[in-house]
Every structure is written in C-alpha cells, then in structure tokens.
Image (tube, helix red, strand yellow):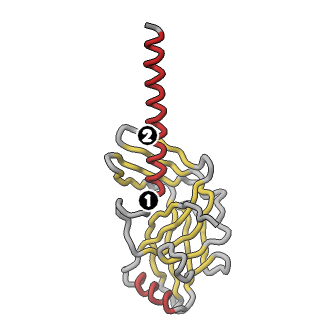
Amino acid sequence: MSKVKNEQRFIEMRAVDNEEGKMIIEGYAIIYDQPATHVYGSRKFTEVIKRGALDYTDMEDVPLRYNHNDTWCIMARTRNKSLQLIKDERGLKIVAELIDTQSNRDIYKSIQEGLIDKMSFAFSVSDKGDHWTYGDEETVREVTAIRKLYDVSVVDTPFYDTTSVYARSFELLDDNLKQIEGVDLRKRKLEIQFKYKNN
C-alpha cells in the first residue's frame, strides 16, 4: 500500500497540571488565519490556513504520535477517546490523556520541563482546497479545505528552513512556479510567432 504524501506543521503545546496526577497535554494543532512566512531560495513563502478549512475534514481516527514516527507507540487516539480534537473559533485544539507507559512518562516529563514544546500535524489538502498568489518576491498559499488529518504529533525538533517539515509545500511551490514559467514561455513563443507572421 503506497503511503499518502502529507504535510506537517509546527504549533506549540504544553502539559496540563491536574490534581489526579494524570498525564494530560493540550495545545492548538491548527490556528486559523495566522500567516507563517519562510524564505525559500530568493523568494518568501507565506502560508495561511483559513477559517473553515476543517469544515469537511476527515478526522475519524487520528493518533497522537511522537515525531510522526510510525514505529513509536501511539500515545493517544481519537478512536478510544484518549485524544480529543476540538474545533473552535481559533482553530483545532487537542487535549490528550496519555496512558501510563514508560515512553509516555518520559515524553510527558520532557514536556513539563520545556524540552519538548512543539506540536505538528500531518494533513492533505482537498482538490481545489488551496489558492496560490504569486508576487515578484513572495508566494502566498491559502489553504481553504483540508481533506484528511493523518495525525497530530509532539515533536522535539524545531523548524528550520533546511528541514523537511515544510518540504511538501516547497515541492508544491516549485511545481507551480515551473507551470507558470512554462505558461510564460509558451506565451512568449506565440507572441514571437504572431509577430513574424504579420511582418
């Protein structure tokens, strides 16, 4: 079975203090209308997830993972209600109660101590679910419809332009820029042909 190519994003998260001693973490996996700008080569790339992008998203069975790692034990899951995904006006909030395993205790301790303080989510965009605007120096991508949420993850590696976190968006940016360059090139060729025909 081929693995679906999905995208990942970083958001902050935290441990929640409680009197029962449960290992609870919470944070926003997605925040609407919050532009994120990164430099890609000589261009700026800005992405915004628009309000309503989650209206028809498949979130039926979403696991909470560590670093999106398939081989790591799942920390929580919507299927058994240990992971809650809450859509509100701000975006998508997650609340997870980690089961009592050694690996979860280690991660929870790292979250409490601030060693791990980021979240990421893996997703795919619906057909015609994003809109690209190309300026001279900046490309803006507005995501208006997320097709599927594959997982939410606690992550220990911060985002750098050279990492693979935004790699899928940069791939899409490359493809779209090549298409535009191809259209411009064909247009110029037609203009030259038209010019010589009429001379």
Q: Residue beneath label 1, please? A: 166
Return the x and y of residue 65 as percentages of the image width and height.
Answer: 53, 76
Return the x and y of residue 116 as percentages of the image width and height.
Answer: 40, 78
Q: Secondary structure at mark 2?
A: strand
**How packed is label 2: few (under 14 Cα within 10 Å), some, or many (20 or more)?**
some
Name the residue rendered at 45%, 24% in the picture: 189
- Could you tell me which quadrant the N terminus lies in? bottom right
Left or right placement of residue 79 versus residue 53 in this view: right
- Could you tell me which quadrant the C terminus lies in? top left
Return the x and y of residue 40 as percentages of the image width and height.
Answer: 36, 51
Q: Residue beneath label 2, please? A: 134
The amino acid on which the numbered mark 1 sits, given as a three-letter code, is Tyr
Query: Can residue 111 be seen in the rendering of this structure?
Result: yes
Above or below: residue 68 compared with residue 133:
below
The amino acid on which the numbered mark 2 sits, given as a three-letter code, is Tyr
Closest to the observer, 167 or 65: 167
**How packed is label 1: few (under 14 Cα within 10 Å), some, or many (20 or more)?**
some
Name the residue rendered at 35%, 59% in the picture: 161
Q: Secondary structure at mark 1?
A: loop
